[in-house]
Image (cartoon, helix red, strand yellow):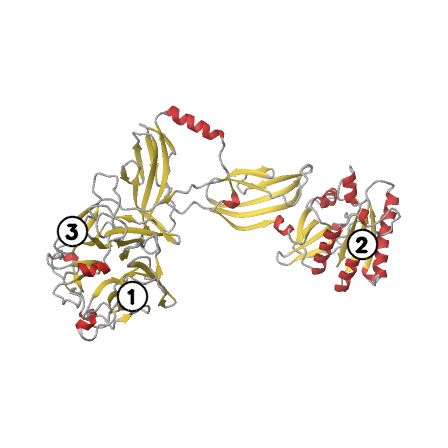
Amino acid sequence: MKIRTFLLILAVIFTEGAILSQTPPYTVTKSAFSTDIYDEFAPVYYRNGIVFCTDRGQAVNSQGQAVVKMFYADTAANNSKSRLFSKDLKSKLNDGPASFNRTADTVYFSRNLVVEGNFKLLSTYRNKLGLFYAVPEAKGWGKVREIRFNTEWFNITMPCLTHDGKRLYFASDKPDGIGGLDIYYSNWKNGYWEDPVNLGPEVNTLGNETYPFINETGELFFTSDGRGGPGGKDIYVTKQKGIGWFEPVALAAPMNSEYDDFGIVTSPTMNEGYFSSDRSGRSVDIYKFTSNMLQIWFSEPQKENIYCFSISDTGVIEVDTLRLQYIWDFGDNTKMYGTKVQHCFAGPGKYSIALDINDRRTGSSYFRKQTYDIEIIDFDQPYITSPVYAVTGSTVEFDGMKSYCPGYAVTGYYWDLGDGTQKSGASARHTYTRSGEYTVRLGLMLRSTSTGDVLKRAVTKKIRVFGTGQEMDSFLAARQASGPEVLDLRQFENVRISSSFSAEEDYKKEAVFQVEILSSKTKMELTNPIFRSVPSKYSIREIHYPEQGTYSYVVDQQMSLMAAFPAYTEMLGSGFNGTTVRLSVLNDPAERELNVLKKNYGVMTDTYFDSRNRLVTNAYLMLDQVVMLMNKYPGIKLEIGVHTDNQGVAGTLLTLSQTRAQVIVNYLINRGISGSRLTAKGYGGTRPVAPNTGWLERRQNRRVEFIVIK
């Protein structure tokens, strides 16, 4: 019996839809070394020729099938001569198909698991096929070793090694598969081949998928009899797409035919190769093919490079825009104003963006709210430069020079203009004769500038062609009325944010707003004359930031941004032109816990005292928590500061606030806190945190402050 019975287990084919061109996509000729009486199939490249499987002069097994051996033909010689590939790799049963690594010094091949003993006993269906490999030695190929996951329970055959040697594809009838024979792969990792992975239903069917071959550009060819192609077995091609695969495409005629076509091998760019077919009607032969045009099957929609974005403030930290102004600096000599702005960058590149809150009256910087160091990068892809809309009869210009494929040099451009027209070159001109929507495809042939490896990539872009200019103008007018959509800078996938600062994020932690009058790289004594003009009602506090190597000198600390504004304004008026507000995350545990207490119980004096300056229930609840805090942290000292509004005589208000501060201190002393750890300070109405123009603002000024003294 001929090898075709054997092929029912092992063979595979491809088919493709019609190509929009009058020129056949392939030229197919029978190879010189094929015979008319024997079967030759499953060619693979090896040095100056190919290694293939054949049943020439071989014995017949117990099922009446001729066993196959691996032969070699020197295709460079262009003659009909071929010979046994290697006596070292010859067994009593089936040898092949094979696959070689890129340096041709390792061969992976299929053969039966048991090859020693009586031929008829060995050749039963129970003697499964497995994968083996060998490397050259001084004379010929060395010891044959088997792949670790071979098993006597099912066949593993038809190996194909990827160009980089890190993945091995094969066919198997494992019981966990989808159909008869499925395509699997195994990855080389940590010095061994990992467990096989099924390619899944995107590739495998209820039928048989066999003869995998993957070329240098990553296109995976295989044979299938379960996809309803023109023949019994047809050749298909797919390519990995993320964690899945593109929908397989059947190779076009005359590659696929009404006969069995399978077992393909191609050059890296698919411009030529070999495949197996029984189209002669007498035997299975190996045919050579050449492509008459660049074959690019898989593309993805072109992503548009965008340089215009919107960016906004989240509004977590409240800002009084009557007194303060949002100013965005985009690092390209452009400034914009407002909580939400739109900006167009000149193109790809690195930019630094800052959002500052400035004093409207003086123009001075009040608070830095956000910063971003960004890089706008063009998408890594072929790129079609063309209009999106056109009119029939007009010339449309297409250009591929803005393609961005870092690490690769473009060696060829291929255009499919969507109406059956195909062109090559970096640019193309075309006139559409019919209105409609066309999908234009640009394919690039690429070569790595570091390794020399080749790659094919393609994108598609839709172009809408109108019958008349009036139709196009009406469409565009309606489209413009809806306005363009502007993406948020932080959501665009090709904007890389290398570093960022958001006061909003720090504010969600335990943080306070500090009025900083001076920042210095060197430590300064508080008796320095530079501090002479600080009003006596303020205490200067030094804070060291070792990670920045700076010393900060602050005069006020508040729980909200706007509460720091009066002190900021006063410091500017006192000659400290560099005054700004800094958000400081509280790292000291005592300060953090005290800040939480102030948020939970509030600091308004109206909730602490009655009209006779006696503590009320809410005050006891808060102050008892303060007692617990000071007992927990026996090293801390507190200033109890009490403030009033401006309704009354200044001296009277000062006395009132001092009295209330002392009442709080006395309560804490009575609860066991040492008086040496407490300071009562009445400020009257000298340090407001809000204008005294209305009842709500005045209420904010009537407050109690608990400050850790260091």
Say which label, 3 or 1, has the lower sequence index.
Answer: 1
Question: Looking at the image, is 397 positioned above or below residue 68?
Answer: above
Label 1 vs label 2, nearer the camera: 1
Query: Which element carries disc 1, helix, strand or loop?
Result: loop
Say which label, 1 or 2, has the lower sequence index.
Answer: 1
Give the alpha-carbon distance from disc 3 to disc 1, as whole Å: 31 Å
Q: Residues within 10 Å of mark 2 (few under 14, many from 20)?
A: many
The residue that label 1 is drawn on is 154
Q: Are marks 2 and 3 in contact (CB under 8 Å)?
A: no
Residue type, mark 1 in image: Phe
- Residue 579: percent from left, percent from top: 69, 46
The residue that label 2 is drawn on is 640
Query: Camera-side residue: 457 or 161?
Result: 161
Tell me the tag on residue 279.
3
Q: Residues within 10 Å of mark 3 (few under 14, many from 20)?
A: some
Say which label, 2 or 3, has the lower sequence index.
Answer: 3
Q: Which residue is painted at 60% across and 37% down in the image?
A: 338
Left or right of 339: which side holds 161? left
Question: Looking at the image, is 506 positioned above or below residue 355?
Answer: below
Question: Looking at the image, is 179 positioned above or below residue 61?
Answer: above
Query: Which element carries disc 2, helix, strand or loop?
Result: strand
Q: Specify whether residue 163 is in view.
A: no
Give the alpha-carbon distance from disc 1 to disc 2, as whole Å: 83 Å
Residue type, mark 2 in image: Ile
- Residue 427: percent from left, percent from top: 32, 38
